[in-house]
Image: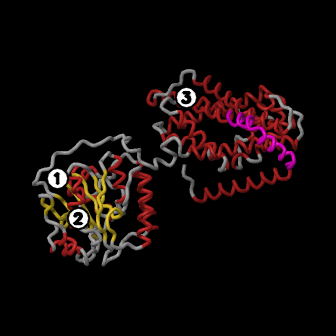
């Protein structure tokens, strides 16, 4: 759910105002010494603290388990994570807006459909309300009626309607979604009741740390009252509402108000820490996280596996060396002239991809002996590289390589770069400047290369030494299978694409010299702003990029 900017600002200010009022209430009501004694008692009893936190955590495990029984396609780990993401979000967002995160998490991270996730969540949350109202009525009907009046009972009607509506929706989805709904209502209500009973252990321990002689039934009642009061909580985490409701319930049971507030604050503080830590962890664990995959699978774990080997290399098969070029008139003629016309007994086709140059790059490349493929207008380096790979694959090249047209890379080293391809040792080869000789590189460019390469090495889980090299080679299968999802650049997304598909990776040392003319398009801030989203898209998209218009020869 995407909120518009004015709505986000309104929600933010509502949250800030509610927090200010809540903290004002707490500050004017709290007995600091009673709170200090309660906190000290909690820290002095690690076993009791662990028991309270463990029971609280187990309550959410129970809820996750029953969710998987209703929706069998939902893994327990992701059900538990979604509940914790929602819990954590409710502790930082007002108006209980974190509830939508529960559905969002499972839809983005599992195969459960939006309809099934929404319907099952609605049914389970409704059962929570019914269970907590039932516990309040069971353990302290007079107290509950005194504190909540008709409010608690009025909750029964919408909660019951939501439960039945969710069940009806799920039954309609049952055949297509594979949902198991037999005896669903008794199961979800029973587990919801069990979860609230487990959560009341936290209130029981907090009350005893504060010095209140409470029975477990009292703790269950107080817990139920706080939950009912927070059904429509304004402040994040229900701060203020929780403390006021818990204190009022303890007072109605005959306990001192200041000590009761200390117990409520202690219980709420522990729950808040648990929720923020648990919610934060649940954003990333289990994989894929709420933000999608951030790394490739480890080597050997790619679901696509190793592509089948291609046909054997014939001596007459050409090698294609292509050069993406945009306004490189000053250098292109010399770079093309230096390129070998044959390597390892194979003829070399030199192809210049003219990316909408406004100078005479194309004419000079043709005069130097290159074939020119014109894109008509400037489409971006990633697009130009993609077109070069498509054209080389169309020509059935036994090996494909490309290098920048600005003279920074040595076309004379073509045989070195394609050698692992021709020998069948690799499908994708990167010429590594860091393993070879760097004649000159500006300090900020070198630092940027180091940082970006380390990021790519982490994401790809491979020993990559030069993630931004402009000299690369491909087998005919890798050239045909490569997909670039970003027109701005190709470097990281191309590597991730081929590694994810199981193509074998290798590096060879190359030389590198600083360009003597023209200007690099790379600016670190602009580069990161464009490429980082493309890396994320590459990691999380199983679909090929949209078909691009074919260039025309010129």
Q: Residue at x 78, y 54 (%)?
A: 21
Q: CA distance from mark 1 to mark 2?
A: 22 Å
Q: Residue at x 14, y 65 (%)?
A: 341
To which quarter of the image does residue 193 belong?
A: top right
Secondary structure beneath dot 1 equals loop
- Residues packed near mark 3 inside 10 Å, few (<14), some (14 to 19) or many (20 plus): some
Q: Which of labels 3 and 2 is toward the front? A: 2
Q: Is residue 327 visible from the viewing direction of this image? A: yes
Q: Residue at x 72, y 35 (%)?
A: 52
- Residues packed near mark 1 inside 10 Å, few (<14), some (14 to 19) or many (20 plus): some
Secondary structure beneath dot 3 equals helix
Q: Which of labels 3 and 1 is toward the front? A: 1
The one nearer the camera, 509 or 264, is: 509
Kindly indicate whether the residue at mark 2 contacts the one at mark 1 (C-beta within 8 angstroms): no
Q: Which residue in the protein does label 2 denote?
A: 413
Q: Which residue in the protein does label 1 denote?
A: 396
Q: Which residue in the protein does label 3 denote?
A: 168
- Residue 400 vs residue 303: left or right? left
Q: Residue at x 82, y 35 (%)?
A: 208
Q: Earlier in the sequence, mark 3 or mark 1?
A: 3
Q: Which of labels 1 and 2 is toward the front? A: 2
Q: Position of residue 182 (x, y in %)?
A: 54, 21
Q: Earlier in the sequence, mark 3 or mark 2?
A: 3
- Residues packed near mark 2 inside 10 Å, few (<14), some (14 to 19) or many (20 plus): some
Image: magenta residue range: 30-54
Magenta residue check for 51? yes
Q: CA distance from mark 3 to mark 1?
A: 58 Å
């Amino acid at each position: 759910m995407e909120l518009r900017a004015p709505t986000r600002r309104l929600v933010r200010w509502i949250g800030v105002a509610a927090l200010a009022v809540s903290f004002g209430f707490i500050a004017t009501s709290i007995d600091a010494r009673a709170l200090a004694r309660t906190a000290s008692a909690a820290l002095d009893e690690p076993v009791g603290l662990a028991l309270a936190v463990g029971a609280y955590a187990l309550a959410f495990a129970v809820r996750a388990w029953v969710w998987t029984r209703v929706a069998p396609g939902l893994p327990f780990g992701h059900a538990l994570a979604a509940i914790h993401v929602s819990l954590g979000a409710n502790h930082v967002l007002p108006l209980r807006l974190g509830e939508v995160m529960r559905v969002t998490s499972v839809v983005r991270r599992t195969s459960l459909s939006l309809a099934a996730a929404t319907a099952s969540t609605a049914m389970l949350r409704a059962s929570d309300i019914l269970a907590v109202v039932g516990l309040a009525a069971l353990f302290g009907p007079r107290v509950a009626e005194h504190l909540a009046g008709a409010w608690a009972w009025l909750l029964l009607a919408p909660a019951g309607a939501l439960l039945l509506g969710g069940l009806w929706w799920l039954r309609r989805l049952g055949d297509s979604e594979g949902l198991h709904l037999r005896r669903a209502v008794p199961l979800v209500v029973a587990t919801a009741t069990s979860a609230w009973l487990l959560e009341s252990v936290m209130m029981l321990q907090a009350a005893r740390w504060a010095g209140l002689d409470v029975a477990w039934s009292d703790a269950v009642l107080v817990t139920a009252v706080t939950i009912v009061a927070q059904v429509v909580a304004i402040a994040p985490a229900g701060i203020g509402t929780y403390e006021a409701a818990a204190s009022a319930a303890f007072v109605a049971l005959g306990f001192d108000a200041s000590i009761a507030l200390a117990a409520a604050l202690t219980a709420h503080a522990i729950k808040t820490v648990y929720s923020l830590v648990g919610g934060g962890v649940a954003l990333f664990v289990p994989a894929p996280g709420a933000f999608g995959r951030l790394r490739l699978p480890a080597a050997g774990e790619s679901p696509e596996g190793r592509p089948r080997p291609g046909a054997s290399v014939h001596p007459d098969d050409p090698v294609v060396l292509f050069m993406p070029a945009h306004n490189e008139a000053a250098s292109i003629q010399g770079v093309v002239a230096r390129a070998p016309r044959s390597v390892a007994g194979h003829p070399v086709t030199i192809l210049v991809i003219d990316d909408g140059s406004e100078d005479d790059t194309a004419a000079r490349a043709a005069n130097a002996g290159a074939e020119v493929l014109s894109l008509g207008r400037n489409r971006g380096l990633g697009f130009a590289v993609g077109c070069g790979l498509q054209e080389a694959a169309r020509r059935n090249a036994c090996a494909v390589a490309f290098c920048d047209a600005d003279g920074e890379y040595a076309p004379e080293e073509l045989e070195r770069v394609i050698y692992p391809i021709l020998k069948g040792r690799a499908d994708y080869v990167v010429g590594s400047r860091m393993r070879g000789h760097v004649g000159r590189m500006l300090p900020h460019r070198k630092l940027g290369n180091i940082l970006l390469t380390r990021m790519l090495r982490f994401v790809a889980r491979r020993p990559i030494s030069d993630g931004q090299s402009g000299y690369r080679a491909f087998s005919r299968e890798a050239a045909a299978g490569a997909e670039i999802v970003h027109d701005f650049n190709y470097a990281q997304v191309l590597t991730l694409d081929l590694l994810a598909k199981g193509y074998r990776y290798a590096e060879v040392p190359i030389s590198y010299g600083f360009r003597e003319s023209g200007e690099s398009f790379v600016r670190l801030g602009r580069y990161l702003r464009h490429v980082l989203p493309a890396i994320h898209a590459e990691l999380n998209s199983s679909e090929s990029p949209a078909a691009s218009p074919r260039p025309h020869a010129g």
